[in-house]
Amino acid sequence: MKFIVDNNVGKLAKWLRMMGYDTLFFDGSDDWEMIMTALAEGRVILTRDTQIMKRGVVTSGRLKAILIKSDEPEQQMRQVVETLKLDCQSGLFTICLECNQPLKESSKQQVRDRVPPYVFQTQNQYVECPACHRIYWRGTHWQAMTKTLEKFRGGS
Ligand SMILES: [Zn+2]
């Protein structure tokens, strides 16, 4: 499942990428442009804009869009997770949070000079973004994010 997130619910983009969902952030002002992108790439629209929900492509079911109810980001995310039964666990850290590119595994030697020494000492698994070359590893940052994502799981 792929998404396009309207700028009125922008915070969702990072969380969805964190969970491994290919997610575009739409920062334009022309709704039609967002709708065309969603149709062309098979993306689900997440928005707070009721006008989008009234468009023919949406009411006819050709395009899937979810109207986000809350103005509070955590509630918004919970709504999306529950409505679409999203997987909050298995896709963790497969997509770059900054550029939405699939991450690739890197060996310890490849990242040697690019991570802090204490990280290099203690971590053995790394993934890297082929676009921005940001490196991700497990550890405290990862644990904090896992904890964040747990909050979005329904019923737990
Ligand atoms: Zn990146």
Image (tube, rainbow, N blue to C red):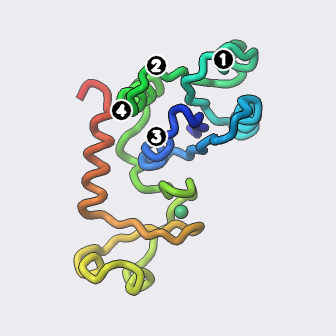
Q: In whole angstroms, how far apart are the C-alphas of marks 1 and 2? A: 14 Å
Under circle 4, the secondary element is helix
Q: Residue at x 60, y 44 (%)?
A: 24
Q: Residue at x 25, y 45 (%)?
A: 147
**Residue 60 image offset from top left, x and y in percent:** 72, 13
Which sits earlier in the primary sequence, circle 4 or circle 3?
Answer: 3
Which sits earlier in the primary sequence, circle 1 or circle 3?
Answer: 3
Above or below: residue 40 compared with residue 78: below
Q: In whole angstroms, how far apart are the C-alphas of marks 1 and 3? A: 21 Å
Residue 11 is tagged as 3
Some atom of ligand 1 lies within 8 Å of the CB belonging to the residue at label 1: no
Q: In whole angstroms, how far apart are the C-alphas of marks 4 and 3? A: 9 Å
Left or right side of 98 for 15: left
Under circle 3, the secondary element is helix
Residue 69 is tagged as 2
Give the amino acid at mark 1. Answer: Gln
Front residue of this view, candidates 103 and 55: 55
- Per the image, the residue denoted by label 4 is 74
Residue 51 is tagged as 1
